[in-house]
Image: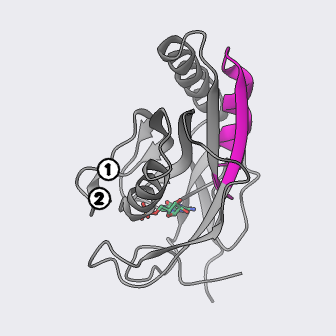
Amino acid sequence: MPTAPRLKPLITRSQVRRKVREIAHQISRDFHGEPVHLVGVLKGASIFLSDLVREVDLEVSVDFMAVASYGRATNSSGQVKLIKDLDSSIEGRNVILVEDILDTGLTLDYLRRILEERRPKTLRVAVLLDKPSRRLVENVRGDYVGFQIPNQFVVGYGLDFAERYRNLKDICVLTPPPLLDERGHPRVKP
Ligand code: 5GP
């Protein structure tokens, strides 16, 4: 009989709340008085962005993108596809790309490149979680990083496994871990 998955809290809701406030205060200090445009990556970053945006003490606007990742992670080209683009132009704006988790770095590398081409005034990256041991793209990093975590599959606070668990308030490790593809992403699709 297969065992039911267990959820082991890794980062509690109060740790998340404190960290999100810290990041928001840092952003408010860095851009003092200037407007910022937060770009969330659907769907995982939606909850992080929703909490972050309410703590930023600046004029803020929000937009979203969605990507699909596929294929082997042995090179950094052609692994990510844009499936929902932004609604408005980012030219001349202070853009903060908001991601749930920085893993191999392929997604952020792709998004950073396409956003840079649109000539924002500034482009920064905020990630809630970072798994440095999984990195395949060397020069990809977050400007604002919540927590560095080990190479474990986590769910909650927006992060899913086959569309489940996004609503968990704590960030939890799923055990046993899901079967992962060559890219390190779960094989099970909803
Ligand atoms: P990357 O392109 O950096 O390898 O992948 C980033 C994406 O992989 C994240 O936005 C997220 O969707 C997914 N991902 C990576 N690690 C995890 C994890 O531990 N849990 C979940 N739920 N998704 C993950």
The disc labelled 1 sits on which kind of residue? Val
- Mark 1 is surrounded, within 10 Å at the Cα level, by few (under 14), some (14 to 19) or many (20 or more) other residues, namely some
Residue at x-position 73% and y-position 66%: 164
Q: Is residue 112 above or below residue 25?
A: below
How far apart are labels 2 and 1 at the CA level? 8 Å
As drawn, the label of residue 135 is: 2
Residue that label 1 marks: 140
Count neighbours of disc 2 (C-alpha within 10 A) and say few if under 14, some if 14 to 19, many if 20 or more: some
Confirm if mark 2 falls within 8 A of ligand 1.
no
Q: Please name which of the two marks, 2 or 1, marks the residue nearer to the observer.
A: 1
Q: Which residues are magenta?
A: 41-64
* Secondary structure at numbered mark 2: loop
* Residue displayed at 42% across by 77% down: 79
For image coordinates 51% across by 11% down, the residue present is 29
Q: Is residue 10 visible?
A: no
Is 164 part of what is drawn in magenta? no
- Ligand 1 within 8 A of label 1's CB? yes
Q: Residue 93's image quarter?
A: top right
What kind of residue is marked 2? Arg
Residue 90, quarter of picture: top right
Residue at the farthest left position: 138
Q: Nearer the viewer, residue 28 or 190?
A: 28
Instruction: Say whether marks 2 and 1 touch (CB < 8 Å).
Output: yes
Quadrant position of the N terminus in the picture:
bottom right
**Image height of 71 relative to 166, above or below:** below
Where residue 126 appears, as percent x and y from the top left, is 50, 38
Q: Secondary structure at mark 1?
A: loop
